[in-house]
Image (cartoon, grey):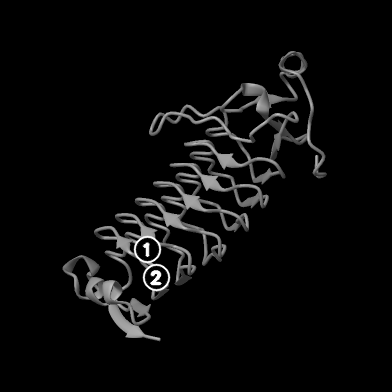
Amino acid sequence: LNDDIALNLTLQQIEAEPDKYIPIGKTKPEYVVAEYNEDGTELIVRKNGENSDGKMMDWELYGFDSIFCGKPIEKITVKKGVTTIGDSAFVELHKLKTVVLSDTVELIGAQAFFDCNKMTQITFSNNLKTIGDEAFAYCESLPDITFPASLESIGIASFYRCNSFKNITIPDNVTTIGEAAFYYCRELTSLILPNNITNIGDDAFANCSQELVLFINNNDYLIEFAKSPTTNNLYPYPF
């Protein structure tokens, strides 16, 4: 399970071994396949087939109907060739601790890891561009994370109530941070924003630590943002 060899199975072959393979492709079910290790604590997600676009299927938001919801998964490894993590794919995995995403992943869907409240480690793809709405909301055990330089957009409420954050640096390529993106991150005391940001949603950093300091460059938009009532407890500090 730990190698990066791509699968090349037909849908018939996958369906013939339902205890081993789970088809979760978006464009075609067989384009992305998941498989468990022997004791069911680790999930491996792979691209399948030469023509696969590597996109995972989406599940209904707030539906909590993902095939993985509630399973005793402790680690998820997404292998080379998978390009998207589907909406609500891994919602409410309360034993999940570790996530490793290959460098082919460009998008993490809305609510992808919603309420994975025991997660303590995630390795992002170095080509990740988009983090969807509420993707990591209620991941209360997730400590300070390092975003990849490739990141461009952080969605609405994407890190809502991530109460273990203390120091966060937003990469230079990020231009948009959604409404309530870091809302109620109660331990967040230091936030560095890049010069390229042109859009920050209301309450993006509201109800964080009373000591939260906003580090900004000489950017007119950020200077005005720091003065806005929606920033609540932010104190702008140029760097």
Side of 212 relative to 115 (left or right): left
Residue in the image at 48% along x and 64% along y: 173
**Residue marked by disc 2:** 188
Side of 90 relative to 232 (left or right): right
Can residue 234 be seen at all in this image of the molecule?
A: no
Q: Which amino acid does label 2 sit on?
A: Leu
Q: Please give the label number shown on residue 98.
A: none
At label 2, counting other C-alpha atoms closer than 10 Å, the crowd grade (few under 14, some 14-19, many 20 or more) is many
Residue in the image at 58% along x and 33% along y: 56
Q: Which amino acid does label 1 sit on?
A: Cys
Is 218 placed above or below 78 here? below
**Which quarter of the rendered picture does the N terminus lie within?**
top right
Q: Quadrant of residue 61?
A: top left
Residue in the image at 74% along x and 19% along y: 14
Query: Residue 6: percent from the left, percent from the top?
Result: 79, 36
Query: Residue 13: percent from the left, percent from the top?
Result: 78, 16
Query: Residue 90: percent from the left, percent from the top?
Result: 54, 39
Residue in the image at 50% along x and 45% along y: 113
Is 238 placed above or below 105 here? below
Q: How far apart are marks 1 and 2 (CA)?
A: 6 Å
At label 1, counting other C-alpha atoms closer than 10 Å, the crowd grade (few under 14, some 14-19, many 20 or more) is many
For the residue pair 18 and 148, the one nearer the viewer reads as 148
Disc 2, SS: loop
Side of 22 relative to 156 (left or right): right
Can residue 155 be seen at all in this image of the molecule?
A: yes
Task: Tell me whether the residue at label 1 lies in contact with that at label 2, contact meaning CB atoms closer than 8 angstroms.
Answer: yes
Side of 209 relative to 145 (left or right): left
The residue lying furthest to the left in this view is: 229
Is 8 placed above or below 195 here? above
**Which quarter of the rendered picture does the C terminus lie within?**
bottom left
**Residue marked by disc 1:** 185
Disc 1, SS: loop
